[in-house]
Image (spheres, rainbow, N blue to C red):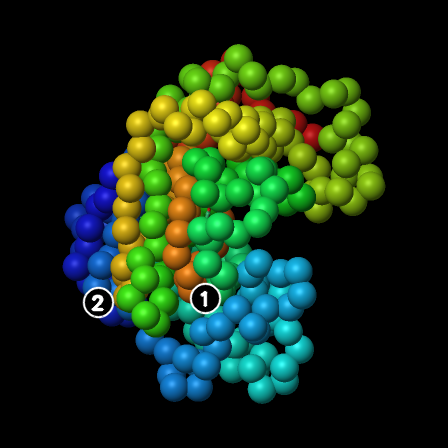
Amino acid sequence: MLYTLANSSWLDTFSPQAQKSAIDALEGGQVIYLPQLAFEFSAAEKELLTPRILGEGSKNISYNPTRKTLKGVINLEKDTHCLKKMMARYSSVSDNLLNALFSRYAGSLMKGRTSFRPIEIAGRATSLLKDDTRLHVDAFPATPNHGKRIIRVFTNVNPVGKGRIWHLGEPFEQVVEQFLPLLRKPLAGMRRLLFWCKVTKTYRTLYDHYMLMLHDEMKKDAFYQRRVKKTVVDFQPGTTWIVMTDSVSHAALSGQFVLEYTSYLPPHAMANVEQSPLFILEQALGQKLIDS
Ligand code: SIN
Ligand code: FE
């Protein structure tokens, strides 16, 4: 479940053999766990460790590295500047780490957003489909990703010793086998309409449709959530972990203050493309899933 690396610097380099083993672990559905890799805050940045910096109605603060903008933050000039610098730094060191550890992906990795999550997860009021305390694979209704892998870097930055408690569920192939009978075809014309009405940012491919169904059906099934085999992992403050959240069944049960960086990877850049959700779903459904 966990593939542990003892590195304690974001600037480390990795031998070809170390990279190969890490890639096989990552693509094989393990979590790359770096228990000694902390993300340090300056004294001023420590002031940001409060949910009060969230804008009204926001769960997270997100940083867009292309536009260099923040979303979800309350409008405090001083904090905004400090927060943006901190999140830009996290985005940059995480991106360096991914490129160093998985240099075979270099040139193919696409930078996504960084989020700062300052709310306690346990007991947070949310709708069932947004409830990340239930096991799920990541798929997002408004942002189709057309088969690209989602690679996420997380660091627990809790200042008072509180772990981030996760569940890890069964392998993706088994999730698919379990929910295959429930994967219905999309209604004719629906995905065009969603795009036309700007409900989705880009066209929702069949891949995105079925991934979203998997995500939703997993969360909706209380019996499955109870009985499926799962492992509890306690990610302590000062630890970092990397995971392909589109294939690894995961849930975050409790914890407060985490940083998360998202990167995307076209499946053809993988070492073992047959382990991509796109390949596995295409095999299971017997059809191509990237349509237009
Ligand atoms: C998730 O990706 O489902 C939540 C992870 C977290 O916030 O720890
Ligand atoms: Fe998730």
Task: Write down the quadrant of residue 163 in the picture.
Answer: bottom left
What amino acid is labelled 2 in the image?
Ser
Observer-nearest of 268 and 2: 2
With respect to residue 209, does 255 lie above or below? Answer: below
| Point 35% across, 46% down: residue | 166
Q: CA distance from mark 1 to mark 2?
A: 17 Å
SS at circle 1: helix
Number of the label disc, if any, that sits on residue 91: 1
Q: Is mark 2 within 8 Å of ligand 1?
A: no
The x and y percentages for residue 16 are 20, 51
| Residue furthest out toward the front | 123
**Disc 2 element:** loop
On screen, residue 83 versus residue 1, left or right, reads right
In the displayed structure, does residue 145 sit left or right of residue 172?
A: right
The residue located at (53%, 56%) in the rendering is 112
Image coordinates for residue 103, horizontal then vertical, percent? 32, 54
Q: Quadrant of the N terminus?
A: top left
For the point 82% across and 41% down, the residue is: 197
Crowd band around label 1 with a 10 angstrom C-alpha radius: few (<14), some (14–19), many (20+): many
Q: Is residue 282 above or below residue 201?
A: above
- Residue 157: which numbered mark, if any? none
Badge 2 density bin: few <14, some 14–19, many ≥20, Cα 10 Å: some
Q: Is mark 1 within 8 Å of ligand 1?
A: no
Q: Which residue is mark 2?
A: 8
Indicate the quadrant containing the C terminus: top left, top right, bottom left or bottom right: top right
3 left or right of 248?
left
Q: Where does residue 220 sit, x and y in percent of width and height?
A: 54, 29
Q: Tag 1: residue type?
A: Ser
Residue 122 appears in the picture as rendered: yes
Q: Residue at x 40, y 40 (%)?
A: 250
Compared with 23, 38 (above or below) is below
